[in-house]
Image (spheres, rainbow, N blue to C red):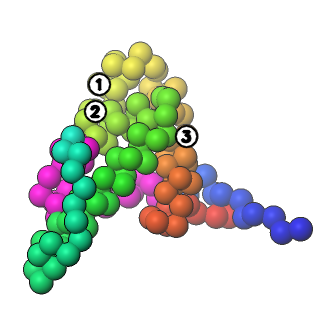
Amino acid sequence: MMTLPEIDEKETIATVRQYFDVRVSRLENIARTSIKSVTMDGVHSQHGVGSDDNGMVARVDAKDELRMVAELIENLGGNEAKFMKYRYIEKLTWNQIYEKSGYSSSRGYQIIQEAFVKFAERAGDEFGLVVYK
């Protein structure tokens, strides 16, 4: 019987944190909008619009990826979704998150780490964020 590889949670957490700190910011720059705006517009873009304009295609692709990220966050549910939304969609500071949620910084740290692992698992191969031992 074949066993599934074990997830390296520490490295997966670091990879997801890097993804949000670097990749999502880059996507927002390319899309010329924030992930919060993309979640509120509710309109899915269509590929092929401006297909001869590389800049337009890049913007459309960036918005699509931002929407996927927002949907993945929403689908986490519970405190994991709440903390991810506060931090990466609403762009709150950690102190604002702890104040708003009522959780201590140590419990908040645990929640966000759990959220990072769940996010990576649910994103699957789409973003390649899971690191295995």
Q: Residue type at mark 1?
A: Gln
Look at 45% across and 54% down and name the residue there: 16
Does residue 38 appear left or right of residue 68 in this picture? Answer: left
Q: Residue type at mark 2?
A: Thr
Q: Are marks 1 and 2 in contact (CB under 8 Å)?
A: yes
Residue 123 screen position, x and y as percent: 49, 57
Residue 28 screen position, x and y as percent: 20, 56
Look at 41% across and 52% down and name the residue there: 17
Depth check, front residue: 30 or 48? 48
Distance CA(mark 1)–CA(mark 3): 19 Å
Mark positioned earlier in the residue sequence (1 or 3): 1
Which mark is in front, 2 or 3?
3
Question: Which residue, given by chain and number where applicable, does mark 3 sit on?
Answer: 114
Residue 93 lies in the magenta stretch: no
Mark positioned earlier in the residue sequence (2 or 3): 2
Q: Residue type at mark 3?
A: Glu
In the rendered image, which quarter contains the C terminus?
A: bottom right
Does residue 57 appear left or right of residue 75 in this picture? Answer: left
Distance CA(mark 2)–CA(mark 3): 18 Å
Question: Which residue, given by chain and number where applicable, does mark 2 sit on?
Answer: 93
Secondary structure, mark 1, is helix
Secondary structure, mark 3, is helix
